[in-house]
Amino acid sequence: MRLTEEEQAMYEGRDGPAVQRAMDLLMRYGRALGAERLVETNNVTASISASTPFMRDFAKQKGGMNAVFSEFSLDSPDVVEIPKVKVFTSHVQLGFDPAQAARMGVPEEAVHFYKKGEAFTTGLGVQAMNTCTPYQVGNVPTRGEHCAWMESSAVIYCNSVLGARTNTEGRESAGAAMLTGRIPYWGYHLDENRLGSHKVELGIDVETTADWGMLGYWIGDQVQERVPVVTGAGGRFSKAPNLARLKHFGAAASSSGGVEMYHLVGITPEAMTVEQAIGSGRPVDTLHYGAEERLATWRKLNANATDTAVDYVMLGCPHYTIEQIWEAARLLEGRKVHENCELWLFTPRAIKTIADQNGYTKIIEEAGGHILSDSCSAMSRATPEGTKVVALDSAKQAHYLPAILGLQAWFGTTADCIEAACTGRWDGRLA
Ligand code: F3S
């Protein structure tokens, strides 16, 4: 790989051993990918926490968070002191919400360690956003900006909706990027890899957030890790989808498949026309999504549930927007969560503060629900005790929770889910 003078100096140890290890890791990673060089990045989303019991034990035995970073983020043979980060870095979601640890069944000792980990994180200059949706709370890269982001649902949003450029990085490459401001120049950093591979023609309008989730789930299944270009019914979208719809669409497409980038013609920034999204003269496959495909997807997402007695409703995958919390609060106002059911909503901490301020937290708590942050049930593997049947408005969470926790999962609209929370029964139907 070709290095600039600055990169060569970091590689030779000018900025200390941690930066040297980071450059070494990026070189090995870049060579394996066939990258010819690195690209500058000023925007990283990463995980540097020690959220599993194994990592906590490792930290205790090997000398704390410097040891964890050296081993798990830098693949370093020895423990090196980690300097402050060189570039703007936000932290992704973690293993639990420290403010709701007891509710999530997390022991006090883990909370204590979590707080130490967070002090280490912020001490390095990393922003403790602790969310899979950093673009909601202050990390909003601009079009064309080169980034190094973890978390598939955030990556697809970053590439497709914001028009910034990132591959799905891992803990190691993102850790190395935050110390060097560099990442291998390959994949979605390059113009040619951002062009569409499949044209998806919609035969129906896509309306609700659940609908956008189903469409994403179907497309991911069809195209796997390729780049879909979606055209609205009759050639144009009747309504521009909002942030929540695009968030659910992308998260679903990156769950059933490995989609990291999509184009919505007339909506997303690199797809003002089909030709712009696909490139001129490139042959692509064409797929059709209509009422039949929508019904099949809804059935697939509900395939493992038979018991209509719901004991847990989880909302907020990816983390809820303030608009979604407002919507949930309106649906819940004046009602009560059923005694046999629990309702948990996940959102970034910063958005929870707005929900507190606007009175939505009070409405949700008075109804018997709870707002949590920093994590989700799939990440934390935490659900209310005894949960067997869960209701969800997220195709991504419906994809993962049955596999991770062996639960029955119902999928539907937010309104279906709030209804299930208040009645303790699933009655969702495809409208
Ligand atoms: Fe976020 Fe958890 Fe879903 S981390 S994208 S809420 S699986």
Image: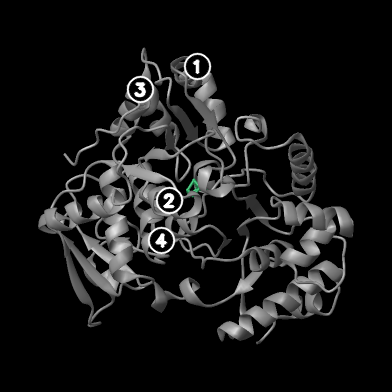
At x 46%, y 28%, the residue is 342
User: What residue did someone put label 2 on?
Assistant: 402
Residue type, numbered disc 3 = Cys
Tell me the CA gap for discs 4 and 1.
Answer: 34 Å
Dot 1 and dot 3 residues touching (CB under 8 Å): no
At x 23%, y 78%, the residue is 284
**Disc 3 Cβ-to-ligand 1 distance below 8 Å:** no
Name the spot of residue 333 as percent of width and height, x first.
Answer: 37, 16
- Please state which of the two labelled residues, at mark 1 or mark 3, is closer to the viewer: 3
Q: Quadrant of residue 116?
A: top right
Mark 2 lies on a secondary structure that is: helix
- The local crowd at label 4, few if under 14, some if 14 to 19, many if 20 or more residues have their Cα within 10 Å, is many
Tell me the CA gap for discs 2 and 3.
Answer: 22 Å
User: What residue did someone put label 4 on?
Assistant: 254
User: What residue did someone put label 1 on?
Assistant: 362
Looking at the image, tell me whether mark 4 or mark 1 is earlier in sequence order: 4
- Please state which of the two labelled residues, at mark 3 or mark 4, is closer to the viewer: 3
Tell me the CA gap for discs 1 and 3.
Answer: 17 Å
